[in-house]
Image (spheres, helix red, strand yellow):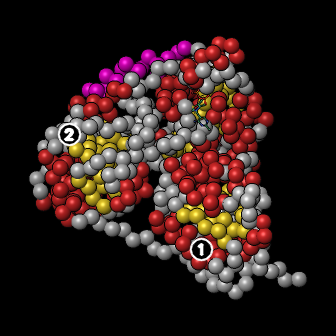
Amino acid sequence: MERRTLVADRIAELLQREGAEFVAGFPENRLLDSASALGMRPIVTRTERVAVNIADGFARATNGERLAPCVTQYGPGVEAAFAAVAQAHGDRSPILLIPGEHDRAAQAPPNICAQTAYAPVTRFAATVNDPATAPEVFRRALHAVRVVRDGPVLVAVANDVMCAEAGDAGWDVASPPRRLSAATAGDVAETLRMLAEAARPVILAGQGVLYAGATDELVALAERTGTPVATTLNGKSAFPEDHPLALGTAARTRPETVDRFLGGADVVLGVGTSLTRSLYITALPASATLGQIVNDPRDLGTGYDIGFGCVGDVRVVLRQMLERLDAEAAPSRDPAAEIARVRSGFLDRWMPRLTSEAGPISPYRVVWDLMAAVDRSRTVLTHDAGHPRDQIVPFYECLVPRGYLGWGKSTQLGTGLGLTMGARLARPDRLAVNIMGDAAFGMVGMDVETAVRCRIPILTIVMNNGLMGGYGEYMPRAVERYDAHRLSGDYAAVGAALGAYTERVADAGELRAAIGRCRNAVESGRTALLEVMTHEEPELALGAQA
Ligand SMILES: Cc1ncc(C[n+]2csc(CCOP(=O)(O)OP(=O)(O)O)c2C)c(N)n1
Ligand SMILES: [Mg+2]
């Protein structure tokens, strides 16, 4: 008997035409089957949130250029995925979610409605309740995820529609081509003038630079105008951090170069950043005049009042500025010597922690030895929430765009594991590494098995300090009476039981070699888990806000 063509089959064909090579998710969702029939690999995770995190990491690592759809079932699957979608929304990661929706007859409270529940955390959300309208809904969704690229996009397909015959609706929809816009000549001239006339300008580069692929242009602008460059947390790796004009990442924790230059800045130009206010983003000085280059006018002046700015694709606008600079005299400033002096003073002060021989091991030593043990131009690193983020971000020096996935307006503990799997799927030529604490591991640790089973070789470093770092102070009586901040577990043993190559290190002197062996295991195709026995480290590089 001839098999009927279902709506799920048509959607799978559409996704394949759009270049999708796999579908991450958790059953039941008929798309997993239809995609498999076309040779698109299903990556079935242990929890929905990790499936979304995989799609999120893939989107970031490819700057939204390629598509990695994510599916869940209606009801519980939709409910379980929310945390990860909210994270992607906070970071505006362009992911495509195709959850199931209840059968049309059951679409009434208390059954959850995906479109309604996810409206606050999606750029676009729609429900398909009729096979005939499905192509049109997907056309809009593809536009939102591939052209707008500004956060999660959701198409919930009623289960009885997904499994129904596709009928003769025209499915020849495709994502429209992207078109980029330039800024007005007046705005470009004013932005350059503000930069040229400033005494101590700073450029703050956000993830828009990464999405626009504008690192080369940003480096050129910084060099031509002698302007130091910091990045936001999401923008980390948009500017090479070993560059003489690099200030590092302006996050909650940061190198002293950030405070020294931002604190004294009279002009700050945000490039590809919404200048959103957050605990994890360094506050901008009230004394500076602020400007922005953004591709969406909705991002102008929402975080702070701004005095000047350009609306246009970041790379196009930076090229406009560089062209103009060819005709104008560039300012003669060279802050490189001052940057180098402040940077080396900062590193000198932190060197005892970065190279500490202490046991249990210092988390800073983990960052330092990782930098020495991997080729950073062929690595994608990400942190997890909590102290691991705060300890890694100021010290891990990124060399290449997307050599780091910075995340966290919100910071869902456990996000890093799935992001890293997504990064590896997107960039098999790179070593994908995540560093997480023991509490973060508890959130998603079973999904190490997904990496093993689905042959997505990554390196996970678990910093096991046996507690939730810093959380004791929020609940002193709970700690005193019940040790409420403490955790326990042998995570190397867990990793081994799940099929990973594992090591456990308690001696700082053995750390670098252990990282090297784990790296070799990953290069041979295995997922590796390195458990490092660390001590609680309250000292953070909080900059001037400390
Ligand atoms: C889902 C979620 N719940 C709560 C938090 C708040 N939180 C941030 S870090 C943290 C503890 C982290 O402990 P661990 O992962 O062991 O890292 P450590 O700081 O101990 O190195 C908590 C509870 C969060 N970020 N995400
Ligand atoms: Mg911990």
The amino acid type found where label 2 is placed reads Asp
Question: Viewer-proximal residue, 298 or 361?
Answer: 298
* Residue drawn at 24 percent across, 62 percent down: 320
Main SS, magenta region, reads helix
Question: Viewer-proximal residue, 28 or 495?
Answer: 28
Q: Which residues are magenta?
A: 341-358
Above/below status of 272 relative to 14: above
Number of residues whose C-alpha sits closer than 10 Å to that of mark 2, classed few (under 14), some (14–19) or many (20 or more)? many
Report which residue position mark 1 lands on.
137
State the image coordinates of residue 36 (x, y, percent, origin top left): 74, 66
Q: Earlier in the sequence, mark 1 or mark 2?
A: 1
Above/below status of 134 relative to 156: below
Label at residue 145: none
* Residue drawn at 75 percent across, 53 percent down: 76
Magenta run includes residue 349: yes
In this picture, residue 51 sits left or right of residue 194: right
State the image coordinates of residue 370 (x, y, percent, origin top left): 52, 32
The total number of labels drawn is 2
The amino acid type found where label 1 is placed reads Val
Q: Based on the displayed image, in which of its 4 quarters is residue 384 positioned?
A: top right
Number of residues whose C-alpha sits closer than 10 Å to that of mark 1, classed few (under 14), some (14–19) or many (20 or more)? some
State the image coordinates of residue 449 (x, y, percent, origin top left): 74, 43
Q: Is residue 216 visible?
A: no
Quadrant position of the C terminus in the picture = top left
In this picture, residue 307 sits left or right of residue 312: left
Q: Based on the displayed image, in which of its 4 quarters is residue 474 positioned?
A: top right
Q: Is residue 374 visible?
A: yes
Report which residue position mark 2 lands on.
266
Magenta run includes residue 116: no
**Which SS class for mark 2?**
loop
